[in-house]
Image (cartoon, helix red, strand yellow):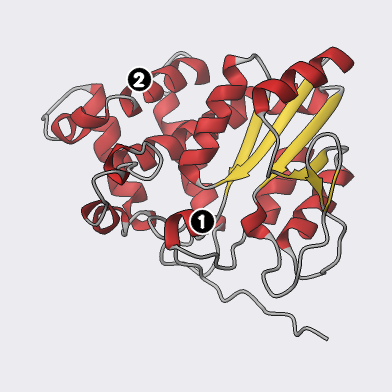
Amino acid sequence: MTEERKTELPLKGKTYTLYGEELSTDPYYEKIRNLADKYLNSFKDENELLEFTRSLSRRKSLLKRITKKDNGLQSRLINNLGDELSVYTKEVENHLQNLSLYEKFEKVISTTEEQYHLYMLEAELVNRIYANEFRRCEYKIALLPHCLRDLSRTCMSKEDEIDYFCKGCSKHCNVNKASTILKSAEINPYIWRNAELKKLFGILMGKYKSVGVLGIACIPELVRGMRLCMKHQVPVVGIPLDANRCARWMGEFHDNTVNLEALEKLVLG
């Protein structure tokens, strides 16, 4: 019988870890909530701050220059985010310095440290904007990364018309643990392998009055998915992986986790 492996904590990622210097990711979630509350004092609402944050993150080549300005809301926001969140992104610069020429033009892999911080804030704001609407949707799905599975054994998930769903074959599997929470909130969890979002939206919207999506992914991929859902007017929420540790980043898969308490609070309110 295969011996179950336990994930060693805290996790280290290729570019980020939500553990920072702590033994839990709970302090990260408290910090990002407090930062969002702080910045909202300078904006009308979450939507206005979200648009401001997004407009900054798209200016990738200018972010370093903006941080060197002595005044202005843009530089104050970026610098303050850096002061508060750099503990989670210590490996970004080293990663960027070792990219191949091809990788430097790959948007996700070449995400800068300033962008990571803006994306962290963006995900928090999107959750605030859409959480209630998401919970009210008639049909809700969650797309989970296969890097959360139990790597010590063969995954027994099965495919249906949407994608692969967890069969609960390992009590140590984080896909299984997350799926249990999601099902309790009447959310249909899937391991995202084959589903094409645009096509999936068309199918589901033809069957249900309202459709909501929850995503779990590394920070750049999570924000990318959230933006796509919003573009198609699909209520979306999401939780970042505790670190980026899949083969895309590290050459091979490493055990990974997600904050299950944060997930439960998000889906149950």
Residue at the disc numbered 2: 55
Looking at the image, which residue sits at the far front?
Answer: 102
Query: Which residue lies at the image location 32% right of the left edge and 43% below the top edge?
Result: 110
Q: Nearer the viewer, residue 91 or 251?
A: 251
In this rendering, position of residue 34 left or right of residue 101? right
Q: Residue 119: where, in percent of width, then height?
A: 43, 36
Query: Looking at the figure, which quarter contains the C terminus?
Result: top right
Q: Height in image: 114 above or below 140?
A: below
> In the rendering, which numbered label is found on residue 269?
none
Camera sees residue 115:
yes
Q: Which residue type carries mark 2?
A: Ser
Q: Position of residue 87 (x, y in %)?
A: 35, 57
Residue that label 1 marks: 27
* Marked residue nearer the N-terminal end (2 or 1): 1
Asked if residue 209 shows in the view, the reply is no
Residue appearing at x 42%, y 32% in the figure: 38
Res 70 → quadrant: top left
Quadrant position of residue 266: top right
- Secondary structure under tag 1 reads helix
- Amino acid at pointer 1: Pro
Numbered marks: total: 2
Q: Closer to the camera, 148 or 31? A: 148
Where disc 2 sits, the SS reads helix
Q: Position of residue 17 (x, y in %)?
A: 45, 58
